[in-house]
Image (tube, rainbow, N blue to C red):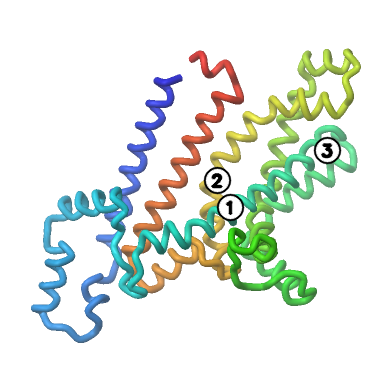
Amino acid sequence: MLYSATTKLLQTLLVLLIVSVASFAFLKLAPGDPVSIMLGSDYSKESYDQLSSELGLNQPVFIQYGKWLADFVRGDWGTSYITNQNIFELTVMQALPVTLTLALLSLLVALLVGIPTGVMAAIYRNTWVDVAATSLAIGGNAFPSFYLGIILIWVFGVDLGWFPVLGFVAPWEDFRQGLWHLALPAITLGAWYVGLVARITRSSLLEVLGQPYILAAKARGEPAWRVVWVHGMRNVLMPLVTVIGLQLGGMLRGAVMTEVVFALPGLGMMITTAVLNREYIVVQAGIMLTGLLFVTVNLAVDQTYQFLDPRLRRR
């Protein structure tokens, strides 16, 4: 188990190193000169050369990369050219909590709706309940997130006035208002994953319900709810956790579009604004932070297998 954890950790560090090289190369290849952006439209060659020297941009590329990586590890991510804010505070302290809160609420929506839907479809296989649940799952996958978000804003925000259309209130400052403002974005982002969770739960549970230990539990006279939710769902968790873990990266990508539609000040909105302003140093920090989140989640999911399946601990 220790060997497996060490191997996974080294793989994670290698992936992060590749992401850092790719994001640094993106910064160098992207159009736009950071020195020109900082100096404005009117500057002399001397002032350009002086600022380039201060920023270390006149040094060889591999030295710039090494210095940038060392600064990134230390938490010195530079200063925004546009807002003059510390980029570490801008990304980690301000944008990241918004994106993580949205992703967690969306995952909660997906699990609370998707698992019961998949269980009902498996129990009432080949009935109208199964057809309705499967149609809901396929419909959730088929609807583009940005289109669903616009419809929800129109119906529940503008027409009915039940939810706020735009704006963000931090749940850790005002829990009720925070959830109220994030309800529509979480439903928008979680809708696609409802279908995914429902389909995985249905197919996995159908396989499990035919196993001998399930038949033995029924023969012992155990209640139907216990047979499904205790004996059955225990073995559905492994494929469900695998799929959710692999799709969390996609959820972070989906959060970009959802944050733009609902004007939420998360990582997606921050990266989009930085791209439009050609502020690639902020884009670079956002890419690195997103990559760090992705590999951390996958590492955590991989280690979760050890607890869900005791056989893996002995390998």
Q: Nearer the viewer, mark 1 or mark 2?
A: 1
Q: Contact (CB < 8 A) between labels 1 and 3?
A: no
Q: Earlier in the sequence, mark 1 or mark 2?
A: 1
Where is residue 224 drawn, in percent x and y? 88, 26
The residue indicated by pointer 3 is 120
The residue depicted at 73 percent of the width and 76 percent of the height is 158
Q: For marks 1 and 3, give the CA distance.
A: 26 Å
Which SS class for mark 2?
helix
The residue indicated by pointer 2 is 248
The residue indicated by pointer 1 is 103
Residue type of the residue flagged with mark 3? Met
Q: Left or right: 207 with respect to 300?
A: right
Q: Contact (CB < 8 A) between labels 1 and 2?
A: yes
Q: Left or right: 18 with respect to 99?
A: left
Which SS class for mark 1?
helix
User: Residue at the left extreme?
Assistant: 46
